[in-house]
Amino acid sequence: IIAFMIGMGTALAGFGIDVGTKLLQNGKYQLTNLLKTNCNDCFWAPFLGYVAINVALVFIGAVMVALGEPVAAGSGISEIKCYLNGVKIPRILRIKTLFVKVFGVLFSVGGGLCAGKEGPMIHTGAIIAAGISQGKSTTLPISTNWLKSFRNDREKRDFV
């Protein structure tokens, strides 16, 4: 049951990233087409609008990571490998890191950066696995009694 919940949570996060990215890209292309139709055969207005939208999306994602949760930068694979080998990295498996990672990937891919979603999905899945297997959250005041036997580092690493 726990493995199913972890899989569904990770799949929902991936689905949300895909849908959000497609919505951002569709809005970006619709705005570019609107600028193109309003400007009679000009090149610069749609081009500069497209570039401005991409810069704004990437800027939003970068500010979220830099100010919100710097540990969410990068793919997250190396951080998870370090955690599995016993290295304690502060805030690596927090829900705030999950949200910043998901929205950072959404805005950077939506902004046109050559960034993949595969590496961040490994980090996302590890955060979801750590949260579900512990049955509690240090960020949110949530604590359940049904998974108390798994609340140690060894079991947490096994689920991650």
Image (cartoon, grey):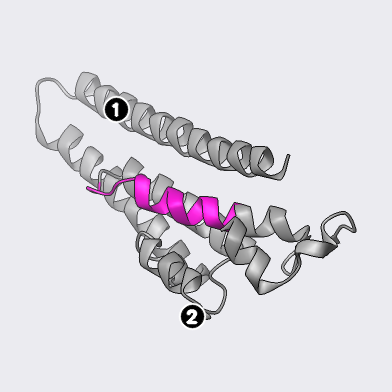
Residue ID at (51%, 59%): 100
- Residue 27 belongs to the span the image colors magenta: no
Q: Quadrant of residue 130?
A: bottom right
Residue 3 lies, in percent from the top left, at 65, 43
Q: In front here: 102 or 77?
A: 77
User: In what element is the residue under mark 2?
Assistant: loop
| 5 lies left or right of 24 | right
| 139 lies left or right of 160 | right
| 71 lies left or right of 43 | right
- Magenta region, residue range: 113-128
Q: In front here: 139 or 47?
A: 139
Image disc number at residue 29: 1
Identified by mark 2, the residue type is: Val
Residue 108 lies, in percent from the top left, at 34, 50
Residue bearing the label numbered 2: 87
Q: Quadrant of the C terminus?
A: bottom right
Magenta: main secondary structure: helix
| Other-residue count near label 1 (Cα within 10 Å), few / some / many at <14 / 14–19 / ≥20 | some
Q: Quadrant of the N terminus?
A: top right
User: In what element is the residue under mark 1?
Assistant: helix
Image disc number at residue 101: none
Q: Quadrant of residue 97?
A: bottom right
